[in-house]
Image (cartoon, rainbow, N blue to C red):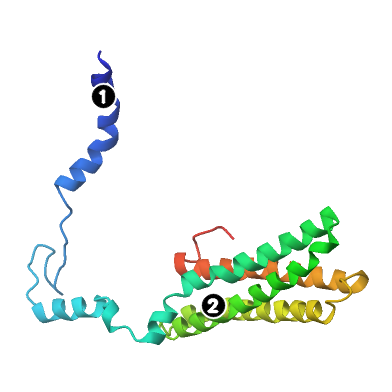
Amino acid sequence: MSPGALLVTFALPIFAPGLIAHAEPQKIEAAAPGGSKDDPIEDLDAIEDVTAAVAPVRPADLTLPQLFGRMHPALVHMPIGWIVLLLLFELAVIAARRRDLEPAGLYLALAALASTVPAIVSGLLRAGELPADLATQAQILRHRNVMLVVTVILATAVTVRLFHRRPPLSGYWRLLYLGLLLMSTALVALGGHYGGKMVYGEAFLPF
């Protein structure tokens, strides 16, 4: 058997179901009350209403707050990256015993704190467009509260860092600062996990 024939022999059982499904699309079956599934749908007004209800909002119709709110999935990743980078930098300074690099950590901390502002504002704007049912609102509240706690803890860490710019952090204050960064990193991961559940569903992951 030639290589081409061998390839077709193995590939056909894999792609055949998809080709058949593409060639013969499933029929949409609907039945009026009291009728069979083969009866045609005669209520055209009902069909038009459903179509109108699920029609997406055109980008040109979005207001500036709505547009900024829809940027939340992009903006929310900025504080996550800055907080993780800040913690890794501070741990690397300790491991390398490079106290001369500590001033750079202050700028990273300020950048991390500043990045939380657009993430929070866009998230609050986006929350106003989401469904008002109790399940969705509970998910929003859980995600929002964790991220607000992250911001408060990070702001406390930055305050400690600013208060002790000179001399470099040491002793109790250094432990407190690192502890706050660890808490911020752990909670921002938890808040991101809750945000993922809002997007992909509660059953997307087993935890």
Image-based side of 180 in relation to 41, left or right: right
Q: On residue 9, which mark appears?
A: 1
Give amino acid for label 1: Thr
Residue 58, horizontal then vertical, whole percent: 26, 78
Where disc 2 sits, the SS reads helix
Residue at 60%, 67% (x, y): give it: 80
Residue at 24%, 26% (x, y): give it: 8
Q: Nearer the viewer, residue 96 or 196?
A: 96
Give amino acid for label 2: Ala
Q: CA distance from mark 1 to mark 2?
A: 53 Å
Crowding near the residue tagged with mark 1, few <14, some 14–19, many ≥20 C-alpha atoms within 10 Å: few
Image-based side of 120 in relation to 161, left or right: left
Image-based side of 26 in relation to 181, left or right: left
Where, by quadrant of the figure, is residue 177 drawn? bottom right
Residue that sits furthest to the top in the current view:
1
Residue 68, horizontal then vertical, whole percent: 43, 81
Where disc 1 sits, the SS reads helix
Instruction: Tell how many labels.
Output: 2
Q: Nearer the viewer, residue 35 or 154?
A: 154
Residue at 54%, 68% (x, y): give it: 77
Q: Is residue 70 visible?
A: yes
Q: On residue 42, which mark appears?
A: none
- Up the image or down, 9 lies above or below 156; here it is above
For disc 2, the marked residue is 119
Quarter of the picture holding the N terminus: top left
Residue at 9%, 62% (x, y): give it: 38
